[in-house]
Image (cartoon, rainbow, N blue to C red):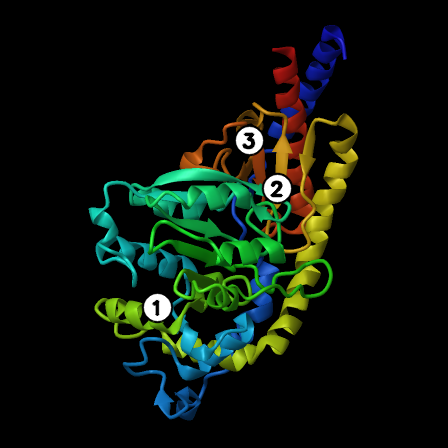
Amino acid sequence: MSKEELKREYEAVSSEFSALCEKDLKLNMARGKPSKAQLDMVSDIFNVLTKPEDFISDGVDARNYGNLEGLSAARRYWADMLNVRAEQTFVGGSASLQLMYDLISKAYTHGLLHSPRPWCREEKIKWLCPVPGYDRHFKVTESFGFEMISVPMTDEGPDMDLVEEMVKDPAVKGMWNVPKYSNPDGVIYSDATIRRIAALKCAAPDFLVMWDNAYCVHEFFGEFVPFLNILEECEKAGNADMVFEFASTSKITLPGAGMSVMASSEANISYLSKLIGVQIISYDKVNQLRHVKYLKDKEHTLELMKRHAAIMGPKFQTVLDTLDEKIAPLEIARWKRPKGGYFVSFYAMPGTARRTLELCKQAGVTMTGAGATYPYGKDPEDSNIRIAPSLPPVSELEQALEVFCVCLRMATLEKLMA
């Protein structure tokens, strides 16, 4: 377009924007929350424990003290889900993020199994962060003062050439990973990438692979996609103690009352259990038992996930169809087309993401802040936007997407005219 054409287009889009602002919308797509329909669907989980005898599992009364590492039945459930041994699991409370934070905290105050000293006594700690990535991960390592180093994501996972070079620095102590339907790009790590991670030759003897398998069974298009067991691959490569894997039922049952797990080598689980045992006698075993009786096993869980997919799939299809119709012809952005997880990763014209989301907020649509998917909240391109379609019903989602597309066009026109 010529400058004059751009000006006329901007006036037309501004008029659309003003009309949207007058609707006084209050729509939220800020986080990947399950919708009310999904929560209602699984609320019968509270009906599985009704009589005193229901609370007994393998001779253990779930209502009482004990079993720090989790009920045996809960450990067997997660072993089945993650294809690991029950002895490699530690079952926690409702949030896997709490287990992740605790692990980093224990490394900082006490050191890990192979640490020469607690991390708080290190002169500097560096941490690898595949980007775009999960903002809450980055907040954890930022809170301990680690220097976070961005590693670009590819279609197969993190840039492993760069990772293999970076870990030659003994100050580099670990790396975040969301290996299946990565947050937000929706990438599934390839077998080659997983094997390269498992075989890393790190200068730091206590290098830590944080393997947040948050979306391990979370397909919304197509069948369940299996992938390599990182614990097994690390064992094969002689790095059995290097990895901790995390998962939870937050987006299987109830985010506010779920069941989490971390899995690692038996030596790691034993070491960390001694440290965690100082702060808590046991996590909520009643909730663990409730989940085991409700979810039963991996096969039954996958059937439940198909019911979630029936709710989630149309929402993601709505996002993709809207972007294909209203944005693709303009050639001003690109986006990923995930088949699972909870997000659509959108790349606007560099320099326009923050402005787009400012305009969305003015029009009553709240989204994840620009820059959140990068360490320190700073996207060097000011381009990536994380779209979270799961919470609103389709009718509200359509309204939010209308606002988003208008705001994107407006921000892009401002950039072009500048």
In this view of the protein, which residue sits in the foreground, 414 or 155? 155
Marks 3 and 2 in Cβ contact (< 8 Å): no
Q: Quadrant of residue 23?
A: top right
Three-letter amino acid code of the residue under disc 1: Asn
Three-letter amino acid code of the residue under disc 2: Ser
Residue shown at 63% from the left, 30% from the top:
348
Give percent across and percent down for residue 228.
59, 64
Residue at the spot of label 2: 345
Using a 10 Å C-alpha cutoff, classify the residue at mark 3 as few (fewer than 14 neighbours), some (14 to 19) or many (20 or more): many
Q: From this viewpoint, which residue is outermost toward the top? A: 4
Using a 10 Å C-alpha cutoff, classify the residue at mark 1 as few (fewer than 14 neighbours), some (14 to 19) or many (20 or more): many
Residue at the spot of label 1: 268
Marks 1 and 2 in Cβ contact (< 8 Å): no
Residue shown at 50% from the left, 28% from the top:
380
For the N terminus, which image quadrant? top right
Q: Which mark is residue 357?
A: 3
Q: What element carries label 2?
A: strand
Horizontal arrangement in the rendering, residue 52 relative to residue 219 (left or right): left
Q: Where 416 falls versus 25 (above or below)?
A: above
Q: Distance between the residues labelled 3 and 2?
A: 14 Å
Residue shown at 22% from the left, 58% from the top:
110
Q: Residue 366 carries which label?
A: none
Give percent across and percent down for residue 77.
50, 78
Which dot, 3 or 2, sits closer to the camera? 2
- Whether residue 119 is visible, yes or no, is yes
Q: In which quarter of the image is residue 43?
A: bottom right
Q: What element carries label 1?
A: helix
Give percent across and percent down for residue 355.
55, 25
Q: Where 89 falls versus 179 (above or below)?
A: below
Three-letter amino acid code of the residue under disc 3: Leu
In this view of the protein, which residue sits in the foreground, 128 or 17? 128
